[in-house]
Amino acid sequence: MIRFDRITKRYPPDITALAEISAEIGAGELVAITGHSGAGKSTLLKLIPAIERPTAGSLLFNGQNVGALPPRALPFLRRNMGLVFQDQKLLFDRNALANVLLPLEIAGFPPREARRRAEAALDKVGLLKRAKAMPIALSGGEQQRLAIARAVVHRPALLLADEPTAHLDTDTARDVANIFIEFHRVGVTVLVATYDASLFPSARCLALSQGRLV
Amino acid sequence: MNWLSAHGRAMQLALARLIAAPLNTLLSILGIGILLALPAGGQWLLEHLAALGRGAAATPQLTIFLQVEAERPAAEEIVARLKKRAEVAKVELLAREDTLERMKRQESLADVIAALPKNPFPDAIVVTPADENPVTLEALATEARQWRQVEAVQIDSDWARRLSALLHLARIGLGLLATLLGLGLVAITFNTIRLQVLTREAEVEVSRLLGATDAFIRRPFLWYGALLGLFGGAMAWLIVAAAMFALRLPVAELAQLYGIELELALPTLPFSAMLLGAAAFLGWLGAALSLRQQLRAP
Ligand SMILES: Nc1ncnc2c1ncn2[C@@H]1O[C@H](COP(=O)(O)OP(=O)(O)OP(=O)(O)O)[C@@H](O)[C@H]1O
Ligand SMILES: [Mg+2]
């Protein structure tokens, strides 16, 4: 599904975030990306939806060279994926339901169908009762689950999550990790960047250090 | 259908955003309305005057005013003399008593006239020429000025010609004004949309990351600008309509003093549609320019 071929990513002025990464991720896999802070986990994840472009090497997603896609093709690339960002990027000017509706509106779902799906996604992460709550009124774990609901609401085949369990207590982290394991079980390909690989015991590990696979 | 519903939703969103900040919206609409009311009202008055000019130019006439102390037989003698001439189609004597009566009926003048010791109006003779050649009319006027007891001769198409020159000037001035104020409208929406984008930066960024196309992101902002223009245009229409209503009687009375029938009307449907269409377009244009400057894909 995803193939990294000698990928290097350099940030200006002279920071090598990733060096010569080669890896392959098959459909239906659960992969944990681990490594110290600054190892390049976020950067690796950002390359897949072309939020960042590789400096060298090629990245194939379903046979498409992502690095070479023109800007106008990016929206359609991204709609194939569900993204959970390290900083969540929830919109605080609207309630939980409206946050989850956004990807469906973007994809042009009819309103009724969109609402049904959004409620189903909230239900799946245990937030249906808080559908009308504003994100600011949710706890850290609830916000994290809301971000997951938004990422999966359009039923993407690939789920990318950047440290979804950071800043959560052990029990909550375990709950959130289990949501991803559930999705993996029903056939979704899942890539999680995490500092605690033990939360995903069934996952294949890609360990990064100083931008290199180890 | 998909395209249509996408626009429908973008419009709803824009409306909701306009309503969510009612004071802001109202002030913008008022600003745009006042901006547009000036050229729109001017244009609408101009159309009245132009219609007037057309009506007058079609029938150039000569009015001969006799001296106030002239006797009636003198006037009748001149009428008879004119009737014999080939270049004259119609001659009409306006007796000074009739003119006085007509003016007395003017409410605003009744008091003034009642206070006068004697009838200030002279006998007048209105001549309609057989052909519309201005040279013939000019010759006749020159001749009539030499006649005994004639005080003044006025070619009525004179004022029509002056009016048309004046209208020409007014049109150019109005065009300049409309251009400037139209630019003002574009500037207002440009800035409004700029602020909108700034306050919605997070939404724009997240939408992009979730796979929104440029068109999807722009659409609500474009509708916002177009709706703001449209409502501003409607406000301008109301202002013009109110002004016409307030000016209707005074203008009609003033015009009657010149023997002209001029009734200000509400803007017609085509004129209103033009006004609203232009306003919405300018609002959209301001938004489009603003977005072009701000939403350059990163
Ligand atoms: N936009 C950027 N501009 C410049 N340098 C960057 C940028 N983003 C990341 N870097 C650098 O690239 C390196 C890898 O960053 P990255 O965010 O991928 O690390 P990470 O493994 O996700 O770390 P963390 O666990 O702290 O999130 C770091 O040295 C970071 O400073
Ligand atoms: Mg990171």
Image (spheres, helix red, strand yellow):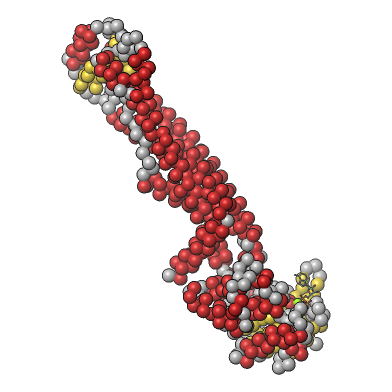
- The residue located at (57%, 51%) in the rendering is B23
Which quarter of the rendered picture does the N terminus of chain B lie within?
bottom left
Left or right of residue A61, residue B256 in this image? left
- At which x and y percent is residue B5? 46, 68
Q: Can residue B191 be seen from the camera position used here?
A: yes
- At which x and y percent is residue A35? 79, 83
- The residue located at (52%, 76%) in the rendering is A115
Left or right of residue A64, residue A15 in this image? right
Foreground of the two, A128 or A183: A128
Q: Quadrant of ligand 1?
A: bottom right
Foreground of the two, A205 or A58: A205
Query: Is residue B28 placed above or below B251 in the rendered structure?
Result: below
- At which x and y percent is residue A186? 60, 91
- The residue located at (22%, 9%) in the rendering is B72
Q: Quadrant of residue B110?
A: top left
Which quarter of the rendered picture does the C terminus of chain B lie within?
bottom right
Q: Quadrant of residue A119?
A: bottom right
Q: Can residue A81 be seen from the camera position used here?
A: no
Tally of numbered discs: 0
- The residue located at (62%, 88%) in the rendering is A183
Foreground of the two, B255 or B155: B255
- At which x and y percent is residue A47? 69, 77
Query: Is residue B23 placed above or below A35 in the rendered structure?
Result: above
Farthest residue toward the bottom? A202
Left or right of residue A119, residue A58 in this image? right
Query: Is residue B258 placed above or below A213 in the rendered structure?
Result: above
Query: Is residue B142 placed above or below B232 in the rendered structure?
Result: above
